[in-house]
Image (cartoon, rainbow, N blue to C red):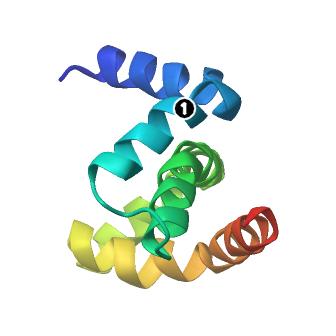
Amino acid sequence: MSRQKCTLLFFYLVMVPIQAMIIALCYNIQGMGLINTFWSMIIPNFGLSVPFAIFMIRAFFKDLPDELMDSAKTESCNEFQTFFRVYLSLMVPAITSLFVFEFKWA
């Protein structure tokens, strides 16, 4: 899937209100046999919160300077090490605030 199609799909997911999906969601949960279980509360909450989480984390990543990647390459880190040693340590405030938002909405 091209980048433009992924972006459009993401924006369509964000633009559709939750109230418009409730009836279809109930039928899907009933079809999976999850009525009166905890999973019937967990799965939709997780699925409906993913677009906001992507939007928030992406905005945080765009604010990070590109020099961090260059300095990590200078220190002979590959992309995997750069992500885990540099970016993931800087993402702690964003992940914490995302956790607070999701906990409050749940």
Residue that lies at the very extreme toward the right in this rendered image: 104
Q: Nearer the viewer, residue 52 or 63?
A: 52
Q: Quadrant where the N terminus lies?
A: top left
104, above or below 89, in the image: above
Q: How many marks?
A: 1
- Tell me which residue sits at (46%, 74%) in the image: 37
User: Percent x, y for residue 3?
Assistant: 30, 23
Residue at 77 percent across and 65 percent down: it is 101
Q: Is residue 104 left or right of residue 54?
A: right
Q: List x then y, in percent, for residue 20.
A: 63, 24
The C terminus - image quarter:
bottom right
Which of the two residues, 73 or 39, is positioned nearer the viewer here? 39
In terms of depth relative to the viewer, which is nearer, 32 or 64?
32
Q: Is residue 63 left or right of residue 78?
A: right
Q: Amino acid at mark 1?
A: Ile
Residue 8, position as x, y percentages in the image: 43, 16
Judge left or right: residue 37 versus residue 97.
Answer: left
Q: Position of residue 10 (x, y in %)?
A: 46, 28
User: Which residue is identified by label 1?
Assistant: 23
Q: Is residue 74 above or below residue 17?
A: below
**Residue 65 in view in this figure:** no
Q: In the depicted view, which residue is nearer to us: 76 or 26?
A: 26
How crowded is the residue under tag 1: few (<14 C-alpha within 10 Å), some, or many (20+)?
few
The answer, for residue 80, to whether it is visible in the render is yes
Residue for point 59% across, 72% down? 91
Name the element at disc 1: helix
Query: In which quarter of the view is residue 15 placed?
Result: top right
Q: Residue at x 68, y 74 (%)?
A: 99
